[in-house]
């Protein structure tokens, strides 16, 4: 499966999970569940857009991959704390948060360095 198709599917699943977790949070879920839902929902549209525009830009590909992994790590750690009673591993959420920052910065760099097509 090509990366752009994988990214699109992963982004759509992030959106679906974000909606489901928002519903869970509104019915008595913790702040961690609501935060994880928000981060998944905030990043899903960006990742979908990147699945269309990153095809010919390696830096955007890398930034999108970092962003996807980071949001999954961050949200996954918050959800593990709530539903499993433990973290994924020490510093998983801060690593995911830092990864999201790095991913967004990579996207900015990729946008600055992109060739113009005409």
Image (cartoon, rainbow, N blue to C red):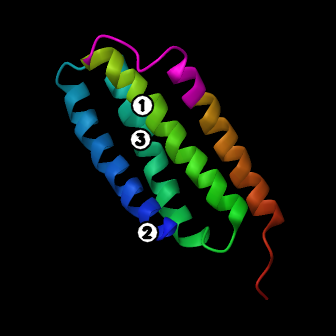
Pair 3/1: label in front: 1
Q: Confirm or deny contact between disc 3 and disc 2 (CB under 8 A).
A: no
- Classify mark 1: residues with Cα within 10 Å, few (<14), some (14-19) or many (20+): many
Pair 3/2: label in front: 2
Quarter of the image that includes the N terminus: bottom left
How far apart, in angstroms, are the residues tagged by discs 3 and 1?
Answer: 7 Å
Farthest left residue in view = 27
- The magenta segment: 84-96
Whether residue 64 is in magenta: the answer is no
Q: Quadrant of residue 61?
A: bottom right
> Which residue is found at the position 69% from the left and 39% from the top?
102
Quarter of the image that includes the C terminus: bottom right
Is tag 3's residue or tag 2's residue first in the polypeptide sequence? Answer: 2
Read off the residue under disc 2: 5
Q: Position of residue 117 (x, y in %)?
A: 76, 84
Helix, strand or loop at mark 2: helix
Read off the residue under disc 1: 75
Helix, strand or loop at mark 3: helix
Q: Main secondary structure of the magenta part?
A: loop
Q: Quadrant of residue 105?
A: top right
Read off the residue under disc 3: 40
How far apart, in angstroms, are the residues tagged by discs 1 and 2?
Answer: 22 Å
- Classify mark 2: residues with Cα within 10 Å, few (<14), some (14-19) or many (20+): some
Is tag 1's residue or tag 2's residue first in the polypeptide sequence? Answer: 2
How far apart, in angstroms, are the residues tagged by discs 3 and 2?
Answer: 18 Å
Location of residue 28 with respect to 45 vertically, above or below: above
> Which residue is found at the position 60% from the left and 38% from the top?
100
């Amino acid at each position: 499966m090509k990366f752009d198709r994988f990214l699109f599917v992963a982004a759509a699943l992030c959106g679906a999970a974000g909606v489901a977790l928002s519903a869970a949070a509104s019915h008595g879920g913790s702040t961690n569940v609501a935060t994880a839902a928000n981060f998944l929902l905030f990043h899903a549209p960006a990742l979908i857009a990147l699945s269309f525009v990153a095809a010919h830009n390696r830096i955007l590909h890398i930034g999108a991959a970092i962003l996807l992994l980071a949001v999954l790590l961050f949200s996954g750690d918050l959800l593990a704390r709530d539903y499993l009673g433990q973290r994924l591993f020490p510093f998983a959420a801060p690593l995911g948060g830092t990864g999201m920052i790095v991913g967004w910065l990579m996207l900015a760099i990729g946008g600055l360095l992109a060739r113009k097509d005409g």
